[in-house]
Image (cartoon, grey):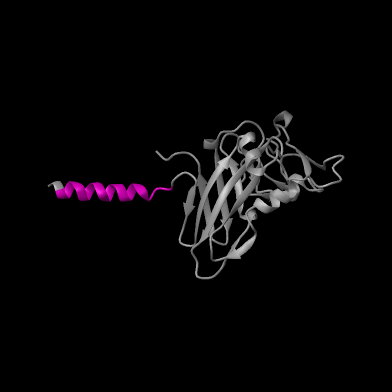
Amino acid sequence: MKYVSLALFISLFAFAEKKPLPGQAGNDDIELVGSIMIDRDEIKQALGGDIGAGYVVARMKVTPKTEKPLRISPDDFTIVSRKDGQRTVALSPGQIAGKGALVVKAAAEQPGGLGTMTNGPIWGGIGMGRGGGGNSKGTQSGTVEATPAKGDDKDNPLLEVLKAKVLPDTESLEPVQGLLYFTIDGKIKQKDLAIIYKGAGGRLVMEFLNPK
């Protein structure tokens, strides 16, 4: 009877281990392991300089499990806030610290019962707002302002650091790791966030809330 109980315990433990852990996701083609930095000082320490407020940085390790090289790109990743529905694709270093960096103003709720305008930032005309299953050109619910930062005719010294640390855009059979840069408006907690991967390895959701 003791042996049966032990076998049952091992079986249940193995089943429990199959549940996705915070910061992990995978399938037959790809494995992801990541962590999120939301504290400005922590991000500053990781980068060696301050990129300003309103950013979330993710450490990401991508391990291909395919027989042929797998395409990996920062463009495969989107961060989502369950708190208010913000949805933002990973930014390029140039969008943060380059000459083409943008100042983006998030739209507010539209008066007069005409619906909700985009609550998150918009980059290059791609909406990151509420209610959408993915990014779409433009926005159905209003307009946002995305203008070049005034007086920034030179690259930020941090640009080269951001480039050096970003998750590379490459094809690989070997594990690849680096940072992903996102923008999130307002106060947020790690448990409110999830990262969606949609790329050559399929579609995965990486949670940061401890499973029950």
Q: Nearer the viewer, residue 75 or 46?
A: 46
**Vertical arrangement, residue 171 with respect to residue 7, above or below:** below
Residue 171: x and y in percent read 60, 65
| Horizontal and vertical percent position of residue 157 | 77, 45
- Decide which of 197, 40 is in the foreground and name it: 40
Above-or-below relation of 120 to 32: above
- Tell whether 13 sits left or right of 56: left
Q: Quadrant of residue 80?
A: top right
| Residue range (magenta) | 3-20
Residue farthest along the left direction in this orientation: 1
Taking the image as shown, residue 127 lies to the left or right of residue 8, namely right
At a point 63% along the width and 48% down the height, the residue shown is 180
Q: Is residue 47 left or right of residue 125?
A: left
Q: Residue at x 48, y 51 (%)?
A: 25
- x then y, percent, for residue 173: 54, 66
- Would you say residue 29 sits in the magenta stretch? no
Using the image, determine if residue 170 lies above or below residue 15: below
Q: Quadrant of residue 54?
A: top right
- Is 13 magenta? The answer is yes
Front residue of 105/10: it is 10
Residue 92, can we see it? no
